[in-house]
Amino acid sequence: MKIALVGNQNCGKTTLFNLLTGTNQKIGNWPGVTIERKVGIIKDLGDELVDLPGIYSLSPYTVEEEVSRKFVLEEKPDMIINIVDSTSIERSLYLTTQLMELNIKVIIALNMADRLEKKGIHINAEKLAKEIGTDVVVISALKEIGIDNLKSIIKSNKEKKFISKEIFKSDIENEILKIESLFGINRFIAIKVLENDKMYQNYQTIEVKNSRQKLEGMYKMSIEEIIANARYDYIVAIKNRVITIKPINETISDKLDKIFLNKFAALPIFVVIMFLVYYLSVGVVGSFTVDWIEGIVKEFGELVRTFLLNIGASSWSQSLVVDGIIAGVGAVLGFVPQLIILFLCISILETTGYMSRVTFLLDKLFKKFGLSGETLVPFIVGLRMQCSCDNGN
């Protein structure tokens, strides 16, 4: 039996794969692409487990999504284990709704469940299973909780047949069913045909185009937006029915987040923190170390000049060694202590999680310039180098 392991990036998929297969695994690349392919045998069951690339949907926008979709459609696994990050269930279930349309048995593994208790969140797994129409098992791959239960569900599902569930409003469902019956295809492909997916252009008949135009006229948006919004409406409705949140005492981290990530105060606070970092690295450390290193380099240069003069070296060779090589290296060495302090301060901010939060906060601003929030750190380092050069001049 061939089983596919599917989930979002950073949802604990690799940890679960290693737990289920142990050391009995082989690694290679997917045909035609350099994406790592992991295949192993599930211990105690003997079934083949294929670890698909981490993806957020089966829409073909990335190479990973192309690989995953091609595998489930062409190689047709007998079962799919959909590992879901239970701390971000709304985002994770988007992929789940697509997997449920493939007419392949799906088991949902709610991972990282141990983290929910700290947040006062409870997911009713039994109710979720009933709502979504498939088995749901609560696990923690990191703490090895629920793995035996997952194996038992895999074993019991081998003889079960899976039927896709209707999740959209009746007007959308009618058009999907029309396309299914028209071509004799499964629900997933019918939806992709309706979305005018490039992989299914041979299905684009007058009837399909009329269905698409009808829905776009009703909703006043593109068909891709209509389907995506309908999926999220379905997911939010389920989330509201299966999740309960208990109020918990705020941690120190939560209180600090409210201050440092405040809608209005976050940017001014960030500017103040960066000023202190620059002042410490360029001002306090810089004013002390630059003069000290320049003094050492100057004295060393004079010693070398005297030595060269005594051995009869020409004036141009003295200038090359002393004024060129030694002075040049000395100028660079003057920045080293400042850089050490700067990277130490940034490392501290990274460790506390502040930099990642600020990166996310500034992502929208940076995108206006064609950049992402992740360019913040190179920007800071580059600005510091410019300041150092200006000070040197």
Image (cartoon, rainbow, N blue to C red):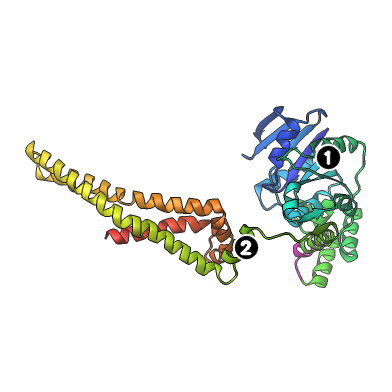
Identify the residue position indicated by label 2 in the image: 255
| 321 is within the stretch colored magenta | no
Report crowding for label 1: few under 14, some 14 to 19, many 20 or more residues within 10 A (C-alpha).
many
Identify the mark nearer the N-term, 2 or 1.
1
Give the secondary structure at mark 1.
Answer: strand
Tell me which residue sits at (89%, 66%) in the image: 171
Name the residue beneath numbered marker 1: 79
Seen in the picture, residue 286 relative to 302 is either above or below; the reply is below
Residue 33 badge: none
Residue 14 in the figure: left or right of residue 275: right
- Quadrant of the rendering where the C terminus is positioned: bottom left
SS class, disc 2? helix
| Residue 243 placement: quadrant | bottom right
* The N terminus: image quadrant: top right
370 to 112, vertically: above or below: below
Say if the magenta span includes residue 224. Answer: yes
Which stretch is magenta?
A: 221-227
Residue at the spot 49% in from the left edge and 50% down from the top edge: 347
Judge by depth and name the residue closer to the eye, 78 or 330. 330
Specify the amino acid type for callout 1.
Met
Q: What residue do we see at 81% from left, 31% from top?
A: 47
Image spot of residue 62 (x, y percent)? 66, 50
Can residue 73 be seen at all in this image of the molecule? no
Image coords of residue 363 (percent x, y) = 57, 62
x, y percent for residue 111 = 75, 46
